Image: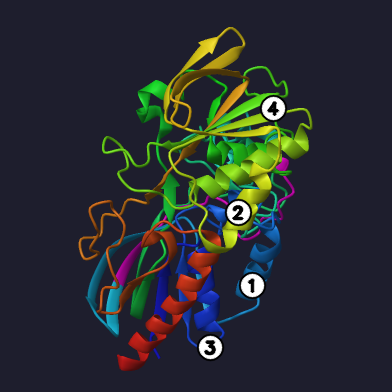
Amino acid sequence: MQDILIIGGGISGITTAVEAAETGYNVTLLEKNPYLGGRVIQMNRYFPKLCPPYCGMEINLKRIRTNNKIKHYTLTEVQNITGNEGNYEVTLKINPRKVTEKCTACGECSASCPIERKDDFNLGLNTTKAVYLPHELAFPYRFVVDTKACIKCGACVEACKYGAIDLNMQAETIKLKVGSIVMATGWQPYDASKIDNLGFGKYKDVITNMMMERLAAPNGPTQGKIIRPSDQKEPKKVAFVQCAGSRDENHLPYCSAVCCLASLKQITYVRENIPDSEAFMFYIDVRTPGKYEEFYTKVKGDERVHLIKGKVASIEQDGDSLTVEAEDILSGNKLRVVVDMVVLACGMQPTNGTLNNISRDQNGFISQVQGNGIYAAGVARKPADVSSSVQDATGCALKAIQSVVRG
């Protein structure tokens, strides 16, 4: 029986893996990061129930740990795919972790390391050492060396009592034979620094929606306390700017589907953490389809939440505050709202891929089910929320199994 290969270890890839493996098929799951979980593991809460993602994710990771039909590789990139349905050969590059399975995650290596680097998991809101644990519930639960930051001083090697650090570890190339492939390569936030008029990168207190998730998360850089990056003070007035780069021919021409819901969710973070706060949401259209309409109505009903239909023209620093200039379409007036912090709802951009035999649409998403044993799951195919991605991934597991059977 040929294996099923899943490229991407986020919620879509994990769901596809466990669904296929628990049906009895062998699965190989790949992830380019040093941990599984993708973007979902960076979230503070899901909407509309506002529950933390660790609950469901931990169950899925346990399903991986206890199922011998699933092999998983982290820090792994796909270099080439050849063949056809039922008979693919895939070339993988496994980048060196520099930390072996002997690691107990005691942290002595990190304590001894003299080098600081920006914490990717927390989107640069804090720093870690060059040898670090990606996050407190990382899977695998093992430290990793940032090879770009490491100066090979050897302090971590000396500090490790278990001989788990090998700074001479090299990248490895392997080839796999598989019967079908699921592309679950996920998404990345649009680069807000490309949007000149919104001030990201220029003003410290203009942050992205993913940065807000990390600020609000109990395991984030501030242990869940929402504070301004510039001075660590609580923001009493927060503006949420929708379609930051989305629905714009100069940036992302499409709607990313979930940004409105994400901002409504984050408004609840601010209101719960800072009871005397106010939130201003500037939008083109509020899109909360189907079952999420009730969530929208609940957030909108808060008298300290102001939803303003209009596009933001500019954001400027004014002393310790930020001035948001926007149109108010419903009143016909121009507004200048002074706030303490701005959150940009940056759109979902597909993770760029370089594989020649994967077709993509004009926006970079994998354009369709390939029809030859290669399938796309979740946000690799189109912008979607977690629930829709899980449903899509379950369907992909079935399609991948069918390809293996045909092969």
Q: Which residue is mark 3?
A: 23
Residue at the limit of the structure toward the right, as seen here: 275
Provide the residue span drawn in magenta. 90-108
Quadrant in which the C terminus is drawn: bottom left
Q: Which residue is mark 2?
A: 41
Q: Amino acid at mark 1?
A: Arg
Judge whether residue 47 can be spotted in this image: no
Q: Specify whether 224 is left or right of 405.
A: right
Callout 2 secondary element: helix
Query: What is the crowding at mark 3: few (fewer than 14 residues within 10 Å), some, or many (at least 20)?
Result: few
Callout 1 secondary element: helix
Quarter of the figure with residue 271? top right
Task: Say whether residue 103 is magenta.
Answer: yes
Q: Residue at coordinates 56% horizontally, 58% vertically from top-left?
A: 37
Comparing labels 2 and 4, the label whose residue is closer to the camera? 4
The x, y position of residue 216, in whole percent, is 68, 40
Q: Amino acid at mark 4?
A: Ile
Mark 3–mark 1 Cα distance, whole angstroms, equals: 16 Å
Q: Which residue is mark 1?
A: 65
Quarter of the figure with residue 320? top right
Q: Residue at coordinates 60% horizontally, 37% vertically from top-left?
A: 212
- On residue 227, which mark appears? 4
Residue at the limit of the structure toward the top, as seen here: 319
Q: Amino acid at mark 3?
A: Thr
Task: Say whether residue 222 is magenta.
Answer: no
Mark 4–mark 3 Cα distance, whole angstroms, equals: 46 Å
Q: Earlier in the sequence, mark 4 or mark 3?
A: 3
Mark 1–mark 4 Cα distance, whole angstroms, equals: 37 Å
Instruction: Tell me if residue 229 comes above or below residue 267 in the rendering.
Output: above
Q: Earlier in the sequence, mark 3 or mark 2?
A: 3
Q: Are marks 1 and 2 in contact (CB under 8 Å)?
A: no
